Structures are given as C-alpha cells and as structure tokens.
Amino acid sequence: DGGITQSPKYLFRKEGQNVTLSCEQNLNHDAMYWYRQDPGQGLRLIYYSQIVNDFQKGDIAEGYSVSREKKESFPLTVTSAQKNPTAFYLCASSSGPAGRDTQYFGPGTRLTVL
Amino acid sequence: GNSVTQMEGPVTLSEEAFLTINCTYTATGYPSLFWYVQYPGEGLQLLLKATKADDKGSNKGFEATYRKETTSFHLEKGSVQVSDSAVYFCALTLNAGNMLTFGGGTRLMVKP
C-alpha cells in the first residue's frame, strides 16, 4: 500500500536532548513537509522540501533541522534549542505544489518532553 | 499575509442534524481552498477542495462552495452521523506556492 509512515508514534525526550522523527513515503512524491500541531490549534509549517537535497524554512523553523538526502525520506530533528517541543508532529507529501496537488499526511508523532 | 479563520468549537449536534462550520479567509492572491478532517489520534485527511470562485467541493455528503465575494468556504452536511465526530480544518494555498495555511480547527461532536 502506498502512503506515509511516521515513527515512532510516541516519543519521550529529556530536556537538553536532540531527537529525530522519521518520515518515509512511497508515493514517489517530490515535495515533503513537516507541521507542528499544538492542542486546540491549527497546524504550523516547520520546514518543507520541494526536491531532494533542497529544503526551505517554514513559519516556525527555529530549533528544528531537516535533511532530504533521499526522495522518500524527510527526517526532522528537534534540537535542544527548541524551547517548547512538546507537540504533535505531522509529516506530509505532495507530488507538486500544494495549490495544484493534494498534500497527504502521515499518522503523526506525539513528542513529550519530560 | 494569508490567514484562515474558523468558528470556534466544539460544535455538538445530535445525529441527523444539519451541520455548518464557518470558514473565512484573507489572501493576497487567488487561493485554492481545502477542508481537512482529523480523527482522534490520526493525521489529516483531505475531505474536499475548490480551486476557483464558485466551485463546489463535495465528498462523503459534505459540501463547501468557494465564495469570493464573501471570502468564505463554509462546510455543510445535511445529516451528520456519530462517525463524523472529528476535528475539521479549513486551509488555503496560493496556486503558485507550496505552503498550506490552516485555520485553528473546529471540533465536531455528534451524539446518538
């Protein structure tokens, strides 16, 4: 089945630690995205990548880093510089720009800082 | 800048009631408009979309019409079911861009 997988589903981190969230897609999509969702709020864009080896900052990139070495993978690292990392993180992909092509979302990773 | 405003929830309805969730937007160009649905503990699924003024998106009994004159994209369903209980997000993107701008989400609770 084609789709987007995110792992792990739940992740716990101690303060001061970096942690990497995985996102893999087998839809052959060029574009991939990371969003953050806080309780009762909408989604905010962290980073996006339109093509392999290229990525752009979104609205709230501070304290996060990404890489796009392979078309199917777009891992997100939450660094110790992110002051309030506890949130639900959603990865998405699309075959082209969001205006033309639908973004498909993964099931999400819930990160909790202890 | 671009923004999306949705009615605050939760919206609580009885089964078979009529649903309206309001969504208005501001945009610097001519956006495409979307409704996404999020079931508990899951990611978002596209429910419907409209790419130009007066277009009507529809899916699973839900409908929304792109109203340029009122900058609105209200979601409607004639008869809701318990299984429709979820959070609904209105979103927009400018056709030349890559980023979705989301509203804050509206939680719908349908009681049997």
Image (cartoon, coloured by chain):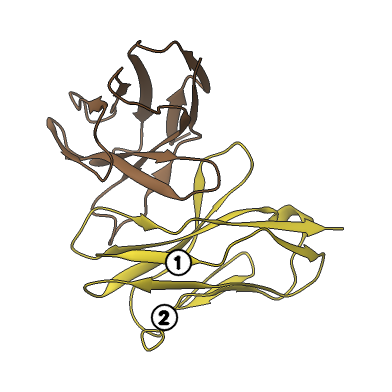
Chain colours: A brown, B yellow
The spot of residue A110 in percent (x, y) is 51, 27
Q: Which residue is mark 2?
A: B55
Asked whether the viewer can see residue A29, the reply is no
Q: Report the quarter where the N terminus of chain B lies.
A: bottom left
Which residue does the image show at 38% across and 22% down from the upper left? A21
The spot of residue A67 in percent (x, y) is 20, 25
The spot of residue A66 in percent (x, y) is 23, 27
Outermost residue toward the front? Answer: A83
Name the foreground residue: A68 vs B41.
B41
* Horizontal side, residue B72 vs residue A60: left or right: right
Q: Which chain does tag 2 point to?
A: B
Q: Which chain does tag 1 point to?
A: B
Q: Which residue is mark 1?
A: B5
Q: Quadrant of residue A34?
A: top left
Outermost residue toward the bottom? Answer: B69
Q: Quadrant of residue B2?
A: bottom left
Query: Which circle, 2 or 1, is nearer the viewer?
Result: 1
Amino acid on which disc 2 is placed: Asp
